[in-house]
């Protein structure tokens, strides 16, 4: 739920949802106008954060075995806690290791967000997905306050914090500060580092751009798990999963999986839908193999074009008179 979205308290009570809602008095919200307060259904409450039950389990996700094993290794921190910290003595050397940061990084469309939900489901907890737009404020210092409020809410509700597109908040700090915005960015990063240090529980991160992370955050995360593009076996399973059993088709899944590598689960899902749309538009009785191949080839080509085009710059010669005309007859000093 977006930051500051109002709800009708009576309607919320009638809801059967198991989601937990964090509210604070309106008079404690900085910079909130009287008009905004009057619009509220309940002038005493204002919604900030909302956790939810995980939407996926590991049974819903197809991933490479090495990625799954790496995740399960970290989760042994909870399932094997007695063995690790009492019998094997890690309680003496790693006294504050109830916390665990797991960073899921890698290619887009490989299931990082789904895996975050599956992790929360395995440990039996609600998940609080953090969107940077919920946290950021144009007022200096307010972003840090929002972060602190979010961590407090997660602690009180025992929710697992999940920073999706985490590089937006974990990016490198500004070294040459030139304005108040740079100062505010560094302040936010520093506050977040402190909050992560003090939060004695599981935090999840997901990003396509781990290279953007500040090294200080990298050191504070227990495990960095890379999500690779699916191998041939996984591609075969993905094609089988996304092509419905009742769909009339002559698709040869083994050929599709073998012929088209370098694609993600999201790519395969989109290809199946696009192939189906083609067959439906043409009033075909089956979704043909050729339609699947055309659809996935278009996706592969578009990804290649996206990475190859870069920024196009066109050049042309202009006269000195033209340049002067753009500056009202006088060149800049």
Image (spheres, grey):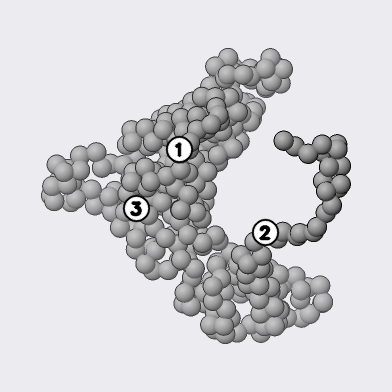
Q: Position of residue 249 (x, y in %)?
A: 67, 81
Q: Are marks 1 and 2 in contact (CB under 8 Å)?
A: no
User: Looking at the picture, does residue 87 appear above or below residue 311?
Assistant: above
Foreground label between 3 and 2: 2
Residue shown at 37% from the left, 42% from the top: 216
Q: Camera-side residue: 269 or 259?
A: 259
Q: Position of residue 266 (x, y in %)?
A: 58, 64
- Dot 1: element: loop
Real-space Cα distance between discs 3 and 2?
35 Å
Residue 162's mark?
Answer: none
Q: Camera-side residue: 186 or 204?
A: 186
Q: Position of residue 3 (x, y in %)?
A: 59, 32
Real-space Cα distance between discs 1 and 2?
27 Å
Q: Camera-side residue: 198 or 117?
A: 198
Residue shown at 38% from the left, 63% from the top: 68
Question: In this view of the protein, can residue 59 be seen by the observer?
Answer: no
Residue 223's mark?
Answer: 3
Q: Camera-side residue: 131 or 239?
A: 131
Residue shown at 17% from the left, 47% from the top: 90
Q: Are marks 3 and 2 in contact (CB under 8 Å)?
A: no
Question: Counting residues from the N terminus, which is met first, the one under dot 1 or under dot 2?
Answer: 1
Question: In this view of the protein, can residue 82 be seen by the observer?
Answer: yes
- Circle 2 residue: 311
- Circle 1 residue: 175
């Amino acid at each position: 739920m977006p930051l500051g979205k109002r709800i009708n308290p009576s309607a919320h009570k009638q809801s059967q949802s198991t989601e937990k809602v964090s509210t604070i008095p309106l008079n404690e919200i900085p910079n909130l106008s009287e008009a905004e307060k009057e619009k509220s259904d309940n002038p005493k409450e204002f919604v900030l954060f909302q956790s939810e039950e995980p939407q996926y389990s590991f049974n819903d996700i197809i991933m490479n075995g090495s990625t799954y094993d790496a995740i399960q290794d970290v989760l042994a921190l909870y399932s094997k806690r007695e063995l690790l910290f009492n019998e094997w003595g890690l309680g003496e050397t790693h006294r504050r290791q109830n916390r665990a940061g797991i960073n899921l990084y890698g290619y887009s469309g490989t299931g990082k967000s789904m895996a975050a939900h599956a992790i929360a489901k395995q440990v039996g907890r609600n998940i609080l997905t953090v969107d940077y737009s919920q946290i950021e404020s144009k007022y200096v210092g307010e972003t840090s306050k929002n972060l602190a409020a979010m961590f407090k809410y997660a602690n009180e509700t025992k929710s697992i914090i999940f920073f999706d597109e985490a590089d937006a908040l974990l990016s490198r700090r500004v070294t040459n500060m030139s304005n108040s915005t740079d100062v505010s960015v560094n302040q936010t990063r520093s506050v977040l580092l402190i909050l992560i240090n003090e939060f004695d529980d599981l935090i999840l991160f997901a990003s396509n751009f781990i290279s953007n992370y500040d090294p200080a955050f990298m050191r504070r995360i227990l495990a960095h798990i890379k999500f690779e593009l699916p191998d041939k076996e996984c591609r075969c399973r993905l094609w089988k999963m996304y092509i419905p059993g009742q769909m009339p088709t002559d698709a040869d899944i083994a050929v599709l999986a073998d012929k088209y590598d370098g694609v993600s689960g999201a790519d395969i899902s989109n290809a199946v839908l696009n192939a189906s749309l083609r067959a439906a538009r043409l009033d075909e009785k089956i979704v043909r193999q050729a339609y699947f191949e055309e659809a996935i080839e278009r996706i592969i080509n578009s990804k290649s074009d996206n990475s190859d085009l870069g920024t196009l710059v066109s050049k042309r010669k202009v006269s000195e008179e033209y340049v002067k005309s753009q500056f009202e007859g006088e060149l800049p000093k």
